[in-house]
Image: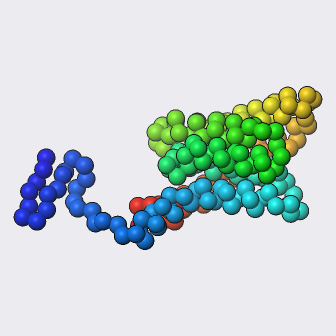
Amino acid sequence: MIKKDNTHIINDRKSPGIRPAFNRFQRIDMLVRSFVPMLFSIFVILFLSIPFDIPGRNELLPAIIVSSVYFWSIYRPKSMPAIGVFFLGLLIDLLNFTPPGIVILILLIIYGIGVTQRFRLVKYNFLLIWLIFSLAATGVFLLQWVLISAFSLRIVPYYSFLFEIIFSIGIYPLLSVLFTWAHQTIANPAKV
């Protein structure tokens, strides 16, 4: 239904009211806000790929990135597109000298779970979302262990993969709080 006014024409079916046009700085601000999840992930990858003496650094990186991909693929998939997830996995593979494609595969599996089930998952409470993440993370890290063992032609010790599973499950609630805050503030393009 279209309403006519002396000065405005408003289309009620699309959106009520008139929205102002954004200036150049507001459009740049919207663009930067929409890239916050990807920029955070790239920063974590680059920071944890620096050879510091951080204990468990190699296990910490996949746990944080898997948590980030899962959260943002549910709550803002436009800010974490599949091509971006692919390049995050590629960056991890290149910087950490892992067998090519394994991290890409596990990140795309997590992304696929988040994106395809997002309309169901947003209705659930946090504990159920965390449980589903726990099952998905366990599955992809076990898959990673199997694939790395297959590439190595020997059974690789499972301790680091077990640590990745435990760490990703344990860190998800903390990262979820941070990501929820970012989702509502600095990473929200609608806040412009």
Residue 121 in the image, given as x and y percentages of width and height: 51, 40
Q: Is residue 178 left or right of residue 144?
A: left
Q: Is residue 106 left or right of residue 36?
A: right
Quarter location, residue 89: top right
Q: Nearer the viewer, residue 178 or 91?
A: 91
- Which residue occupies the extreme left position in the image? 6
Residue 27 in the image, given as x and y percentages of width and height: 42, 65
Q: Nearer the viewer, residue 134 or 43?
A: 43
Quarter location, residue 5: bottom left
Residue 186 in the image, given as x and y percentages of width and height: 51, 65
Q: Nearer the viewer, residue 123 or 26?
A: 26
Q: Is residue 47 left or right of residue 15?
A: right
Label count reads 0
The correct choice, above or below, for 186 with respect to 15 in the image is below
Residue 160 visible in image: yes
Viewport quadrant of the C terminus: bottom left
Q: Going 51% across and 63% down the picture, which residue do you hit?
A: 32
Q: Going 72% across and 50% down the picture, which residue do you hit?
A: 91
Residue 133 visible in image: no
The correct choice, above or below, for 60 with respect to 31 in the image is above
Quarter location, residue 36: bottom right
Q: Going 87% across and 37% down the picture, which residue do you hit?
A: 158
Q: Is residue 85 left or right of residue 149?
A: left
The correct choice, above or below, for 22 with respect to 100 in the image is below
Residue 100 in the image, given as x and y percentages of width and height: 78, 39
How are the residues colored? Answer: rainbow
Q: Going 93% across and 29% down the picture, which residue do you hit?
A: 154
